Image (cartoon, grey):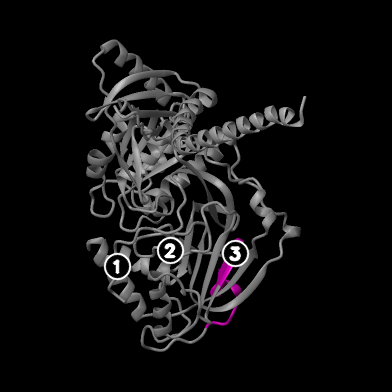
């Protein structure tokens, strides 16, 4: 065979290979063009599958059906924790498909709730199906899931104070709260209080076994009385008169007062609907409380106390109960500022330790471990607060550096200063910051505080001028028993001897969720 004859097949083979490669390149280009489209469709299909697979693999679908939501048909899936509805979209003649966005509703938020800021508002999702039997299956299953084991209450003891603020507590409950309780199948046992101390007397005697919680419809005074009653009742039931015991039942607060600082601290707003929905949905928040005692005897449980200016303001306001709450508050504020005088006392405090926050609510440090800091002198105001005390007047709170459950309280001591400087300090509470940036204001994170009036320390009495109010050290409010006045959660308390305040972590549970700042809708123009 000649050399040329040997080369001929090889040339033909190379030509064939070139044609084949060319076809492969053309084919690759076509695939590349279609690849982008295929990839998009593949991603869309994967997203759709992920929605379906997530429900199947993670939780398991209990029910599935076709319902109309609005005017469109939807594929509705029910699991133990959520309701999902996906629009059913027919195929497009061009072959192009779009992935429908599913709607999702968590059952923990049903009966349906959506959030708008800090306010909770009711909303409704309507599912329509022509089959009565199919509808009943869905209804019964949803009902069982919603009313199953959870923190949601089924039976509540309700106390309503008809004299709170504008005397509209009964109206607030009937118009805004009762309908929500009825929709959620929450049964209630209602007591309309007749006088101060009525709720406490009822709580001492009634059987609490059948209740899931207690509800207070009223102002700060009513809240203080019921919080005290719940912890005091827990002490009685536990046979522990000396050691605080954590309250068994949670307390729900429906705001119906003039300031509602505790309600604002756990809701962020003074809105009865928001408060009622927190109760219905079982949102629970453990909260620190303080015990107030004198000479070893318990006086009260509460969240805050003000000695000096705060106590004097309340004492003056209580004498003008015939005025409206706004006028009474502004009158007392202006009058007390006009007669501003410091209190002479000994102030001792126990700095909070990190280890204290991990202890049980009833435990306290041993006396040998306590290292008290003691100061004595003139103070215009002394405040002890275990909660931020938010309100529309003070959106960041009277004690913005504390929280509901950090195991400590904020001690705010305002020393003697001029009236103008003190007013500047007060005005700062309505702004975002700076209320403590004064040389005469000191703050401490504490676990206990002791206040002893001048008359009990053994200091010499100073002579008073003939004209009333001229002394710079004499207390404004005098009594025969030499008692000094405390404002404990908006309630006026007179104590004849020194008072000891201790913080007890997580002593009570409230319905609500802690917030950083309150909704501000009210401004005070009196200073």
Q: Is residue 429 left or right of residue 321?
A: right
Magenta stretch, residue numbers: 443-461
> Tag 2, which secondary structure?
loop
Seen in the picture, residue 52 relative to 169 is either above or below; the reply is above
Label 3 or label 2, whichever lies nearer to me, is 2
Looking at the image, which residue is at 26% across and 46% down? 169
Mark positioned earlier in the residue sequence (3 or 2): 2
- Kindly give the residue lying farthest to the front in the view shown: 2
Residue drawn at the location 34% of the way across and 52% of the way down? 219
Residue 36 among those drawn in magenta:
no
Residue 168: give x, y in percent of width and height. Answer: 23, 48
3 or 1: mark nearer the eye:
1
Name the N-terminal-most of marks 1 and 2. 2
Q: Are marks 3 and 1 in contact (CB under 8 Å)?
A: no
Mark 1 lies on residue: 523
Q: 207 or 466, which lies in front?
A: 207
130, 17: nearer the viewer? 17
Residue at 33%, 34% (x, y): give it: 112
Q: Which residue is mark 3?
A: 445
Residue located beneath label 2 in the image:
396
Relative height, residue 259 to residue 86 (above, below): below
Q: Are marks 1 and 2 in contact (CB under 8 Å)?
A: no
Assess whether residue 453 is covered by the magenta stretch: yes
- In whole angstroms, how far apart are the C-alphas of marks 3 and 1? 29 Å
Task: Assess disc 1: are there few (<14), some (14-19) or many (≥20) residues with their C-alpha within 10 Å of its C-alpha.
Answer: few
Please state the horizontal and vertical placement of residue 326, each as a whole percent of the image.
Answer: 26, 64
Q: Which corner quadrant of the image does residue 498 belong to?
A: bottom right
């Amino acid at each position: 065979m000649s050399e040329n004859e040997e080369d001929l097949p090889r040339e033909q083979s190379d030509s064939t290979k070139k044609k084949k490669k060319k076809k492969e390149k053309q084919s690759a280009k076509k695939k590349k063009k279609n690849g982008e489209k295929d990839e998009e469709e593949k991603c869309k299909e994967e997203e759709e599958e992920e929605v379906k697979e997530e429900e199947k693999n993670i939780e398991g679908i209990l029910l599935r059906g076709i319902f109309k939501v609005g005017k469109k048909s939807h594929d509705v899936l029910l699991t133990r924790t959520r309701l999902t509805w996906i629009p059913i979209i027919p195929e497009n003649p061009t072959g192009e498909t779009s992935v429908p966005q599913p709607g999702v509703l968590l059952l923990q938020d049903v009966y349906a709730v959506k959030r708008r800021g800090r306010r909770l508002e009711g909303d409704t999702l309507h599912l329509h199906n022509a089959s009565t039997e199919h509808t009943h299956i869905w209804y019964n299953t949803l009902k069982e899931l919603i009313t199953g084991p959870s923190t949601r209450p089924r039976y509540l003891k309700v106390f309503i104070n008809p004299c709170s603020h504008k005397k509209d507590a009964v109206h607030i409950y009937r118009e805004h709260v009762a309908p929500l309780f009825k929709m959620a199948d929450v049964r209630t046992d209602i007591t309309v209080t007749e006088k101060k101390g009525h709720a406490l007397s009822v709580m001492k005697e009634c059987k609490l076994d059948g209740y899931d919680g207690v509800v207070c419809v009223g102002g700060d005074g009513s809240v203080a009385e019921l919080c005290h009653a719940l912890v005091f009742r827990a002490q009685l039931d536990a046979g522990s008169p000396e050691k605080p015991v954590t309250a068994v039942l949670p307390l729900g607060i429906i705001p119906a007062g003039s300031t509602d600082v505790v309600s604002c601290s756990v809701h962020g707003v003074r809105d009865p609907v928001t408060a009622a929905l927190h109760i219905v949905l079982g949102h629970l928040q453990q909260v620190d409380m303080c015990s107030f005692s004198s000479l070893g005897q318990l006086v009260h449980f509460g969240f805050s106390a003000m000695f000096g200016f705060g106590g004097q303001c309340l004492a003056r306001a209580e004498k003008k109960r015939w005025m409206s709450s706004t006028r009474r508050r502004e009158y007392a504020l202006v009058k007390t500022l006009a007669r501003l005088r410091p209190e002479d006392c000994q102030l001792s405090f126990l700095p909070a330790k990190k280890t204290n926050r991990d202890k049980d609510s009833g435990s306290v440090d041993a006396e040998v471990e306590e290292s008290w800091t003691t100061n004595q002198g003139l103070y215009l105001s002394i405040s002890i607060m275990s909660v931020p005390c938010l309100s529309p007047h003070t959106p960041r709170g009277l004690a913005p550096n504390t929280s509901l459950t950090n195991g400590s309280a904020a001690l705010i001591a305002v020393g003697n200063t001029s009236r103008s400087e003190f007013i500047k300090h007060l005005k700062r509470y309505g702004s975002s910051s700076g209320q403590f940036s004064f040389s005469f204001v000191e703050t401490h994170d504490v676990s206990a505080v002791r206040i002893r009036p001048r008359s009990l320390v053994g200091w010499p009495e100073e002579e008073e001028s003939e004209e009333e109010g001229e002394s710079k050290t004499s207390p404004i409010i005098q009594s025969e028993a030499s008692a000094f006045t405390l404002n404990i959660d908006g309630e006026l308390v007179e104590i004849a001897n020194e008072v000891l305040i201790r913080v007890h972590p997580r002593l009570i549970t409230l319905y609500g969720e802690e917030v950083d700042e309150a909704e501000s809708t009210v401004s005070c123009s009196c200073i």
